[in-house]
């Protein structure tokens, strides 16, 4: 089987190469924004969607009107048009929101699909119109390089090399199954009673970040001193993101290597972290407390945790199953009784029906694992097609199931209902 994998390295360009990189990124941003503006104007006029081929055919004319575009490689400009087309397709297929214009200084990047060379022995990469650029090979490069994306972050340039290689079909070495309950007090609680403490990367740097942000606010915008303070703020944000990524990669790697089946909750992080501010006519309640909760939720990186688990389990031959999170911490794993009185406070769980006691997060992880096993054992339908709703059991509702992706399965229903 073929495996696509990206390897990211830090570049060490000279001053002239840095200026050229900034110029290439600016040209790429300009072409992307022009394509987006043209699509919006065409849509407002009642026209059809303009394809990438039609956009690319207009590039020579655009270069004649703006000669400075000729200084950038044609590949980077064409890739910008492909990115714009992909953004619209993701919007039409409801995988993302409406495309937005790119701003200077935010996620500056450009991509080379061909025409590059990699010299690992001398630690350098040859890029079109840039020549040989030195880089830091921090890890071994596996496979054949297919494309290179150059990006800028916190004053540094990076090269992300996507490779392709043939690997043997994965055979899982582990044979155990685990259920995971995600939270804030405990980042991840496992059905066997173990748990991972949260990193809280943003919270650790919050005071220092606020201090530098106040300094930047007191400077004249776009002045040299303002730019220096902004660079310091960006550096802190980069460190927060790097610490979080390192924590998540270590956690997901350990889980994927030690378990063949992982069951998690299908959390809607976007909905969970919505603001409670409301509007002027209907102001929200407990806005400050909800704001702090939203920061804590986003600081955990639950979506990134699930994304990493999905592809790492696929590489190791495992399986990821996502189940609905409703009442996982209120359902007794012993008698299947569902009640909010089972969990009156944050941590303790006490079943009012049978007296079962445990930590609420452990109970949630146990129920998540049971729901995932029910899906695999009972062979419930996980296709996107509508299916008949099964009968209801006592005070517990079971709904049809859906699939979130080819590698992640989604099951609905409550724990403790026998297969129909």
Image (tube, grey):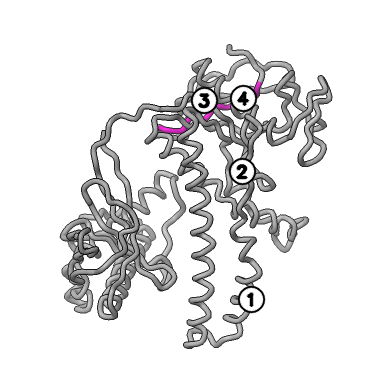
Q: Nearer the viewer, mark 4 or mark 1?
A: 1
Percent of width and height locating residue 314:
39, 34
Residues drawn in magenta: 407-415
Q: Secondary structure at mark 4?
A: loop
Residue with the mark numbered 2 = 196
The residue wearing badge 3 is 176
Q: Residue furthest front?
A: 121
For label 2, count other residues whose C-alpha is less than 10 Å away and answer few (under 14), some (14-19) or many (20+): few
Q: Which residue is mark 4?
A: 413
**Callout 4–callout 1 Cβ contact below 8 Å:** no
Rendering quarter of residue 136: bottom left
Mark 3 vs mark 4, foreground winner is: 3
Magenta stretch holds residue 36: no
The residue that mark 1 highlights is 211
Identify the disc placed on residue 232.
none
378 horizontally vs 35: left or right:
right
Question: Answer yes or no: do the residues labelled 2 and 1 have beta carbons within 8 Å?
Answer: no
Classify 10 Å Cα crowding around label 4: few (below 14), some (14-19), many (20 and above).
Answer: some
């Amino acid at each position: 089987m073929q495996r696509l994998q990206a390897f990211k390295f830090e570049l060490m360009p000279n001053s002239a190469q840095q200026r050229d990189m900034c110029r290439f990124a600016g040209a790429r941003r300009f072409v992307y924004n022009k394509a987006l503006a043209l699509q919006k104007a065409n849509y407002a006029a009642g026209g059809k969607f303009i394809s990438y081929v039609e956009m690319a055919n207009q590039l020579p004319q655009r270069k004649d009107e703006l000669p400075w575009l000729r200084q950038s490689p044609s590949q980077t400009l064409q890739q910008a048009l492909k990115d714009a087309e992909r953004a619209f397709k993701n919007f039409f297929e409801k995988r993302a929101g409406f495309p937005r214009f790119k701003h200077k200084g935010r996620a500056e990047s450009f991509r080379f699909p061909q025409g590059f060379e990699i010299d690992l022995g001398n630690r350098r990469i040859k890029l079109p119109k840039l020549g040989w650029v030195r880089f830091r090979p921090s890890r071994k490069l596996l496979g054949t390089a297919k494309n290179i994306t150059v990006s800028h972050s916190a004053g540094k340039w990076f090269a992300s090399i996507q490779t392709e290689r043939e690997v043997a079909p994965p055979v899982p070495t582990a044979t155990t199954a685990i259920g995971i309950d995600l939270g804030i007090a405990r980042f991840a609680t496992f059905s066997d009673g173990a748990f991972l403490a949260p990193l809280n990367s943003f919270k650790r740097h919050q005071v220092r970040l606020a201090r530098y942000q106040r300094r930047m606010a007191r400077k004249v915008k776009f002045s040299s001193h303002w730019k220096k303070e902004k660079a310091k703020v960006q550096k802190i944000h980069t460190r927060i993101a790097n610490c979080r990524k390192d924590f998540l990669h270590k956690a997901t790697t350990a889980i994927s290597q030690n378990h063949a089946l992982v069951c998690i909750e299908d959390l809607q992080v976007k909905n969970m972290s919505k603001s409670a501010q409301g509007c002027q006519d209907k102001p929200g309640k407990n806005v400050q407390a909800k704001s702090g909760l939203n920061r804590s939720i986003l600081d955990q990186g639950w979506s990134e945790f699930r994304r990493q688990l999905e592809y790492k389990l696929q590489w190791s031959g495992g399986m990821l199953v996502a189940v609905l999170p409703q009442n996982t911490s209120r359902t007794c794993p012993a008698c299947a009784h569902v009640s909010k009185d089972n969990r009156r406070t944050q941590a303790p769980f006490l079943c009012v029906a049978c007296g079962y006691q445990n930590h609420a997060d452990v109970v949630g992880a146990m129920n998540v694992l049971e729901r995932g096993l029910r899906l695999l054992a009972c062979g419930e339908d996980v296709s996107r097609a509508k299916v008949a709703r099964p009968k209801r059991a006592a005070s517990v509702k079971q709904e049809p199931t859906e699939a979130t992706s080819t590698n992640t399965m989604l099951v609905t229903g409550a724990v403790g209902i026998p297969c129909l």
